[in-house]
Amino acid sequence: MQPILYILISFILTYTLVPLVIKLAFRVGAVDNPSQRKVHTQPMPRLGGLAIYIGFTVIVLLTQPLTQQIIGLLIGGTIITILGIFDDIKDISPRLKLAGQILAACVLVVYNIDVDFITHPLGEGILPLGYLSIPVTIFWIVGITNAVNLIDGLDGLAAGISVIAAITLAIVGFSEGQILMVTLALMLAASTLGFLRYNFHPARIFMGDSGSMFLGFNLGALAIMGLVKSVTIISIFVPVLILGIPIFDTLFAIIRRIINDKPIFKADKEHLHHCLLNKGFTHKQTVLIIYAINIFLGGTAIVLTYLTTVQGMFILAIVSTLTLWGAQKIGIMGRHHTSKQLSQKTVGK
């Protein structure tokens, strides 16, 4: 009964804080102003991540023993949130942002949240990473942090995907007996749901980088804490599927830019949500479709934990084929093509 109460308090705390954060955002200048490429006609506050951070961090501090991993998660999350707040108020350089993300990831390593081994790709057993665990962990955390940040392009999109991912992490973690990760994941989902009430279309506030990076950072960290310690080959793919939408969208963006001979880090309007809007779906329909895709991927991840290696690889082959087919069909991975003007449909952060 107590864990349910903690989760409910996390939701209520964030839900209560969002109106206050809206006022604070206007006072400190954390505002997304209207422009030709954005749909909103009035300045929008973009400091929503602060409410999510407080709702999650406070309840963790009040209810969880301050173990080494909990301390590392909270310190790293604080660093990433402060970084995001500065970026929401006054845009900071990509290099500084990357440096801050790496610092936060290093904190996790110091506090024993790291990928210290991988499953042997040719069968059962493990391959200890040794010193390679540091760059592997940093790459995973920074990658997921930025992947969630990139998907934050429509009202309610990043928040909803993060809720689905966190709940899926909790379900898989429960089956693996990872009770701490389950509790933390559900608290994160609850605090994000408290924010989503104000962020779903039409949004009253954007989560900003303070929110998208905080969510990506914590989802990546929780996946390490609970899902990469198994010795079965399928365990490698479970967190990838759970975080499938931001991971695949980022991967396809890299492939697309290479195909079109464009800089990898140059922003474009060919992400999944852009492509769906271009197909004629409304803002809300696009978000709900992506939710459904993420639920499908999360459900597949849950099923994988109950299958043999052979069965799991067969399912993965089907999912991979469907993913590639869907990406080609929607146009997310192909050569640049003439598209409708998305500026009247898309929303900035």
Image (cartoon, helix red, strand yellow):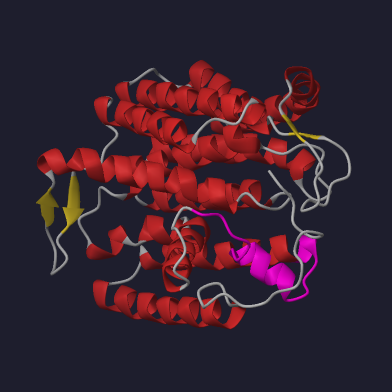
User: Percent x, y for residue 178?
Assistant: 36, 42
The segment highlighted magenta reads: 266-285
Name the quadrant containing residue 72. Answer: top left
Which residue is drawn at the image coordinates 44% and 76% (left, top)?
319
Looking at the rendered image, the quarter that the C terminus falls into is top right
Whether residue 167 is visible here, answered yes or no, is no
Look at the image and say whether residue 270 sits in the magenta stretch: yes
Which residue is drawn at the image coordinates 39% and 55% (left, top)?
239
Name the quadrant containing residue 179. Answer: top left
Position of 233 compared to 188: left or right? left
Position of 46 compared to 78: left or right? right
Question: 270 or 176: nearer the eye?
Answer: 270
Residue 20 sits above or below residue 112 on the image: above
Looking at the rendered image, the quarter that the N terminus falls into is top right
Question: 164 or 87: nearer the eye?
Answer: 87
Residue 108 sits above or below residue 204 on the image: above
Question: 335 or 22: nearer the eye?
Answer: 335
User: Furthest residue to the right?
Assistant: 41
Position of 19 compared to 151: left or right? right
Which residue is drawn at the image coordinates 77% and 59% (left, top)?
343
Look at the image and say whether residue 336 sits in the magenta stretch: no
User: Percent x, y for residue 342?
Assistant: 75, 64
